[in-house]
Amino acid sequence: DVHFLDPEDEVYRRIIMAGKGFADADNQAPLYLRTTEEMLKEFQYLGSDKAMEVVVTNTNLIADMIESISPVRPDKCPPVIPDSDKLLTDICYSKAHEMYGPNLPQIVQDRLEKELNSIITNGFAVMYIIAQKLVWKSVEDGYLVGSRGSVGSSFVATMAGITEVNPLSPHYYCTKCFYNDFYSDEVKAYAGKAGVDMPDKVCPKCGEPLKKDGFDIPFETFLGFKGDKEPDIDLNFSGDYQPVAHKFTEVMFGEGHAFRAGTISGIKDKTVYGYVKAYCEDNGLMVSRDEMDRLVQGCAGVKKTTGQHPGGIVIVPQENDIMEFTPIQYPADRSEGDTITTHFDFHAMDDRLVKLDILGHDDPTVLRMLKDITGLDPQSIPLDDPDTMRIFSSSEPLGVSLEELDCDVGSIAIPEFGTTFVRQMLKDTRPTTMEELVRISGLSHGTDVWLGNAQDLVLSGTATLSQVICTRDDIMNYLILRGGDPS
């Protein structure tokens, strides 16, 4: 019945119990993990031979009688959707032909082949099909889905309709006669940048306005250089629609085969600090700042309660039972709720089961509302619309003065661009292109990436926004462009 590792650790248990209001917190039994020598000493009253028998011989005797079993399955069990390989290939090729014509440009053909080969040989097609079904269902019901994280670097995900980010290099293409341009000098000048920033052009063959696309993101960002990294497809559904998407996964895999991912949370530093402070005051202890920090570190992270992941759904294959992988429970022991989660936190099972991230987000909800109010389909709005682009460098397009709010950029109500911190970045850089907006998002989401770092380089004129490191991919792309070996 071990309560702590070393004898001196009892102080941590005292503090936590006192923080929880136990009156006998200071009566700690010395229940620390004893070594063999310490155990023999404890049983010395039996005499040394008998002590040896009790402490060493018998415990090993019992241990040897117990067979070695694993309470959970050790192998990977991804869900199965019949013919998912063929289904994914068909969906991708039909979309590619719809965009680029009956004869696919070599670059499109090569990228599709390379990705599909990686995805199918490593058994990941089912993940793509699940995501595709979820996204198509949501779009059909009138809510766009935001792809989150690195799924935008997969061209197969673009062709399957999972993401609208096209990771090919910048290019022009014509939807009428299927003319395309990936290789002209004008296009190549935008390598590593965003295709939507290229100048508007008309098709030299049929005179239609050309579409501009491509964000130049290598597939390796998503599945690694060997193409065998487990794909992590995170999707932002409208908060209004999230419960529907969760229910739909249950419909897709059947009842008892889709569970909310559980979490186990520990006591946070701030809470512990309160416990330690109160304990020292109640017991009249004067401790130094360093001792205070030591006590806080000793108590932090102790299990506090169980909860649920904001959007994680764990999928159990048709032929399996959840109990083969994890016990299940009501989070925080609240049995009146109808949510049942896995007992193990997902990371303890990620080598065995597949988890989907179906997260709730405000953006798709707002886009749906704006569509209802204006009648404009958000996907029909060009990403390089000049007036919209000017919002990020001036408040003038809004037609109102934001002086009273000490703000001279119009992004005040735009998600991720409206905070004081990001508005200051916009004032420092005055972006005019989609590429710069993507870079600003990269810089604003990291810790200490902008302040005291990239900001100094930009403001001193040492580097422009497109020269500083804004995303992890920048490092990889820069080295590959300079001839470094990819892996």
Image (cartoon, rainbow, N blue to C red):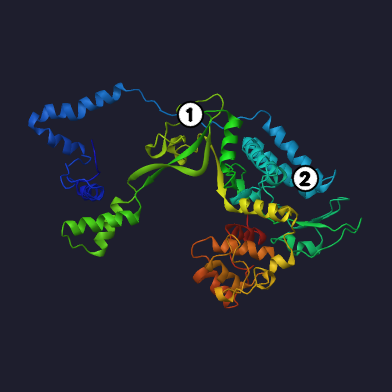
Q: Which residue is drawn at 62% across and 63% down?
A: 439
Q: Residue at x 57, y 41 (%)?
A: 230
Q: Quadrant of the N terminus?
A: top left
User: Which of the two labelled residues, at mark 1 and mark 2, occupies the earlier sequence position?
Assistant: 2
Q: Is residue 40 left or right of residue 468?
A: left
Q: Where is residue 237 in the image (x, y as percent from the top left)?
A: 60, 46
- Above or below — where is 396 with respect to 233? below
Q: Which residue is drawn at 77% across and 40% down?
A: 93
Tag shown at residue 128: none
Q: Position of residue 95 (x, y in %)?
A: 77, 43
Q: Quadrant of residue 27?
A: top left
Q: In which quarter of the image is residue 117?
A: top right
Q: Mark 2 points at which residue?
A: 109
Residue nearest the observer in this picture, 82 or 374: 374
Dot 1 falls on a residue whose secondary structure is: helix
Q: Mark 1 points at which residue?
A: 322
Q: Identify the amino acid type marked 1.
A: Ile
The answer to the question of whether label 1 and label 2 lie on touching residues, with beta carbons closer than 8 A, is: no
Q: Identify the amino acid type marked 2.
A: Gln
CA neighbours of label 1 inside 10 A, class few (<14), some (14 to 19), many (20+): some
Q: Where is residue 175 in the image (x, y as percent from the top left)?
A: 84, 51
What is the total number of numbered labels drawn onto the structure image?
Answer: 2
- Above or below — where is 221 with respect to 134? below
Of labels 1 and 2, the one closer to you: 1
Q: Residue furthest right?
A: 206
Residue nearest the observer in this picture, 123 or 133: 133
The residues tagged by marks 1 and 2 sit, at their Cα atoms, a distance apart of 41 Å
Q: In which quarter of the image is residue 410?
A: bottom right
- Above or below — where is 441 with respect to 303? below
Q: Residue furthest front?
A: 373
Q: Residue at x 73, y 53 (%)?
A: 375
